[in-house]
Image: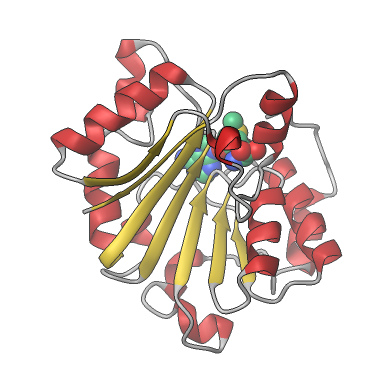
Amino acid sequence: MRQRNKPWADDFLKDNDQLVIPNAMDHKGKWQSVFKNDYPIHVEIGTGKGQFLAGMAKQHPDINFIGIEVAKSIIVSAAEKVMDSEVENLLLLNEDAADLREMFAENEIETIYLNFSDPWPKSRHEKRRLTYHTFLEQYKEVLDTKGKVIFKTDNRGLFEYSLVSFNEFGMKLEEVSLDLHAMDDPLNVMTEYEEKFAAKGQVIYRSRASF
Ligand code: SAM
């Protein structure tokens, strides 16, 4: 995702610390109290500019959404999008999601979304793919017993790799779509990347898997 240098980003994040929550680790195991309700928690890793979660938060007011985005200049755009959409059930974390267990307790999350994650096509970078088994291990810990991983991508190689990885980890595939947009799912909320790739005529893949 294209990043523009935003020298004012630090000040922006300080001024908006009710939305982009600093020190995420301090809230481990207590996220529902941050939202001040007991709705389930859904987390997106690599939120980008926030279009997906802003749409999801509007569509599902009884779910608490948390978006994690490592790039400061990008999370600023996500925060602006959240403010424009006036949703209250969505928080952002400017963190590296290298280990979700640092930020979430066991069973704290109901659903994890991976949308158009970086594909890391070289085999020497396999460990960086967000569907590599070490990530699945941590997702399993922080997800509740019915927890799901919902994954969308335009990248066929990463999709094939991920299905095998889910299977080798013993996960149950509940849905696999090889052409999501042909299904015309009225509840599908498009991400920025999804819109861009779909406009070019590329097929979008989606899977839903549980442990
Ligand atoms: N999900 C968005 C979409 O579909 O439009 C953005 C996709 S973009 C290819 C991947 C995003 O994930 C980038 O914004 C990148 O900064 C973020 N990202 C990559 N690794 C991450 C990590 N370990 N923790 C948090 N964000 C990460």
Left or right of 58 in this view: 121: left
Residue 43 vs 159, above or below: the answer is: below
Locate the N terminus by quadrant. top right
| Residue 165 versus residue 32 in the image, above or below | above
Residue 28 picture location, percent across and down:
39, 72
* Horizontal and vertical percent position of residue 2: 73, 28
Q: Is residue 62 left or right of residue 86?
A: left
The residue sitting at 38% across, 66% down in the picture is 110
Ligand 1, image quadrant it occupies = top right
Nearer to us in this view, 61 or 48: 61
Q: Position of residue 37 (x, y in %)?
A: 53, 88
Residue 132: % across, % down: 28, 33
- Snapshot quadrant of residue 6: top right
Q: Nearer the viewer, residue 135 or 144?
A: 144
Q: Relative to 41, say whether 160 is above or below.
A: above
Residue 140 falls in which quadrant of the image? bottom left
- Vertical arrangement, residue 99 with respect to residue 128, above or below: below
- Residue sitting at x 14%, y 34%: 168
Q: Residue furthest front?
A: 183
Residue 101 quadrant: bottom left
Tell me which colouring the rendered structure shows. Answer: secondary structure
Instruction: Point out the image quarter for the C terminus.
Output: bottom left
Q: In this rendering, does residue 103 appear at all?
A: no
Q: Count the numbered circles shown.
A: 0
Can residue 79 be seen at all in this image of the molecule? yes
7 on left or right of 68: right
